[in-house]
Amino acid sequence: MEVVVAPVAELARLAADAVQRLLTARPEAVLGLATGSSPLAVYDELARRHAEEGLTFARARAFMLDEYVGLPADHPERYRNVIERDLVSRVDLAPGAVHGPDGLAADLAGACASYERAIADAGGVDLQLLGIGTDGHVAFNEPGSSLASRTRIKTLTRQTREDNARFFGDDLDAVPTHCLTQGLATILSARHLVLLAQGRHKAEAVHQLVEGPVSAMWPATVLQMHPHVTVLVDEPAASRLQLAGYYRETWASKPPWQGI
C-alpha cells in the first residue's frame, strides 16, 4: 500500500495521471468509477485534459461501485445521473460504455448476480477509484460486511445516511435505506485501487485503513490485502497516521518515472 500526503489538487493530478497512463497504454481499459465528493477533483482534471489536451475515453468502458435502491430514474441523486453529470457528459465515453447496478430492478438479487457477470465478462476492472466513509466503508460495504462479499443489496447505517443527507437537502428521510453495492471481494478483484480522502473527518478511517488491523468493523482495511493500492490523502485526512513522516519520505524518494 502506497500512501501519498499532498494538497487536494496534487492528489487529483496524480489520480488523473494514473488514468491517463492506463488509457494511453490500453485505450480499451476498464475503469471503476466512484461517486461522492472524494473523486470530484479527479473528474474535473480528467475533463480538463479531455477538453484541452485530447485525452480520450472513446474505447474505454466503466463500472460504477454502487447505486441506491428505489430512487426514480430521473432523480438527480441517482448515481447513474450523478456520474453522468460529474464525468460522462464532460468526456467522450461512448453511449452505453458506463454500467451500474440496477437499483430499480424487480429482481434485485438477480440484478446483482448479472452485474458481477458483466464485470467478469469485461475482463475485470483495471483501475478502480474509491472513497472512504467516516465509518470506514468503501462503496456501500458498511461495518460488519463480509470481507469475501460480492455485489449485493445492503442496508445503509444511520451514520452513512446522515453523511449523505447533504445531497438530499439535509433531509435524512429522503436518503434511501437500501443500496446495491459491489462487494469487498469484487473491489479487490480490480488490478489497481486508488483511494482518495480529504478532510479531518476522514482521519480516523484513513488511520484504520492504512495502519489498523484487517477487520470487518473497518471494511476498508481489507485493501491491505491487495497488491497494488494507492491511498491519496490531504494533510487533515492524514493527521492520525502514525507513520506519516515515513510515507512522506518514501514519496519524496520515489523515482519520478515510476508513477503510482
Image (spheres, helix red, strand yellow):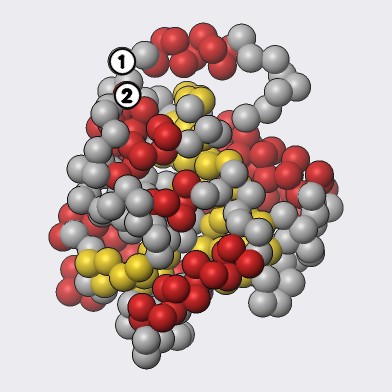
Q: Residues within 10 Å of mark 1 (few under 14, many from 20)?
A: few
Q: Which mark is residue 250?
A: none
Q: Is residue 68 above or below residue 37?
A: below
Check disc 1 and report the residue beneath it.
Answer: 242
* Lower position in the chain sequence, tag 2 or tag 1: 2
Q: Is residue 239 left or right of residue 105?
A: left
> In terms of image quadrants, where is residue 71?
bottom left
Q: Residues within 10 Å of mark 2 (few under 14, many from 20)?
A: some
Q: Nearer the viewer, residue 230 or 236?
A: 230
Whether residue 217 is visible: yes
Per the image, label 1 sits on a secondary structure element best described as loop
Q: Are marks 2 and 1 in contact (CB under 8 Å)?
A: yes
Q: Is residue 13 above or below residue 212?
A: below
Look at 18% across and 55% down and name the residue there: 159
Kind of residue sitting beneath label 1: Gln
Q: Is residue 145 above or below residue 253?
A: below
Look at 48% across and 36% down and name the residue there: 226
Look at 28% across and 52% down and name the residue there: 146
Kind of residue sitting beneath label 2: Glu
* Residue 128 percent coordinates (x, y): 55, 49
Q: Which mark is residue 211?
A: 2
Image quarter in which the C terminus is found: top right
Viewer-side label of 2, 1: 2
> In terms of image quadrants, where is residue 85?
bottom right
Q: Is residue 175 above or below residue 7?
A: below
Q: Is residue 36 left or right of residue 124?
A: left
Q: Nearer the viewer, residue 217 or 20?
A: 217
* Residue 42 percent coordinates (x, y): 58, 47
